[in-house]
């Protein structure tokens, strides 16, 4: 009988890598398919076993993170506060395990047929905050260009969510 991810010690852990950007764009075959100005580039890695709860956690954290400058130059404003845009790009390599050897293992990443509905669910959850949400193309070979503002880069792991 094959072992499950839980039996191997893996836990759900959708990962969002948040980059505060002045601008960002996704290109496929040299053609721009999405671009944003001031806002957040969100690279997202979906783990096997992730759920709607992980989607909600990541989305709420991302749009409410106080990582934009206020009038005094302090990080006190969220994406919602500034009316910014968000560009979401699926990136399974965020779940790469580099602890052993020199080649990363991607066994924690969800299979495409499991990950795609969750990726699409994350896009819809972000749109529910009534802000511009653009995206890369799931499963495509993409070039992502960005101009970091700061730079400010953070990692959000849904495994870290506080359980009541």
Image (cartoon, grey):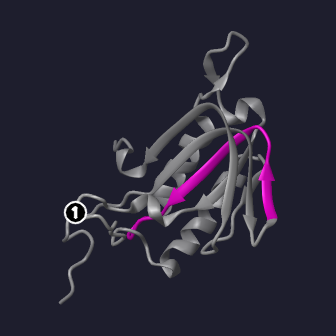
In this view of the protein, which residue sits in the foreground, 102 or 52? 102
Q: Is residue 25 above or below residue 142?
A: above
Q: Is residue 39 above or below residue 109?
A: above
In this view of the protein, which residue sits in the foreground, 34 or 31? 31
- Quadrant placement of the C terminus: top left
Stretch in magenta: 32-50
Q: Position of residue 159 (x, y in %)?
A: 36, 51
Q: Position of residue 163 (x, y in %)?
A: 34, 44
Q: Is residue 49 above or below residue 78?
A: below
In this view of the protein, which residue sits in the foreground, 88 or 31? 31
Task: Give the labeled residue for mark 1.
Answer: 100
Q: Residue at x 51, y 51 (%)?
A: 16
Q: Position of residue 55 (x, y in %)?
A: 52, 57
Q: Residue at x 58, y 49 (%)?
A: 59
- Quadrant placement of the N terminus: bottom left
Quadrant of the rendered image containing residue 85: top right
Q: Residue at x 39, y 44 (%)?
A: 161
């Amino acid at each position: 009988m094959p072992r499950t991810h839980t039996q191997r010690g893996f836990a759900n852990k959708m990962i969002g890598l948040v980059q505060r950007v002045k601008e960002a764009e996704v290109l496929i075959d040299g053609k721009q398919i999405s671009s944003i100005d001031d806002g957040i580039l969100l690279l997202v890695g979906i783990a096997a076993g992730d759920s709607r709860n992980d989607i909600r956690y990541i989305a709420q954290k991302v749009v409410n993170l106080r990582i934009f400058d206020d009038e005094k130059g302090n990080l006190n404003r969220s994406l919602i506060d500034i009316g910014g845009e968000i560009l979401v790009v699926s990136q399974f390599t965020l779940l790469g395990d580099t602890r052993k050897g020199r080649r990363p293992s991607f066994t924690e990443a969800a299979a495409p047929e499991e990950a795609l509905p969750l990726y699409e669910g994350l896009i819809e959850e972000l749109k529910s905050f009534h802000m511009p949400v653009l995206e890369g193309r799931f499963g495509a070979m993409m070039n992502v260009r960005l101009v970091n503002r700061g730079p400010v880069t953070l990692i959000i792991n849904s495994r870290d969510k506080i359980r009541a």
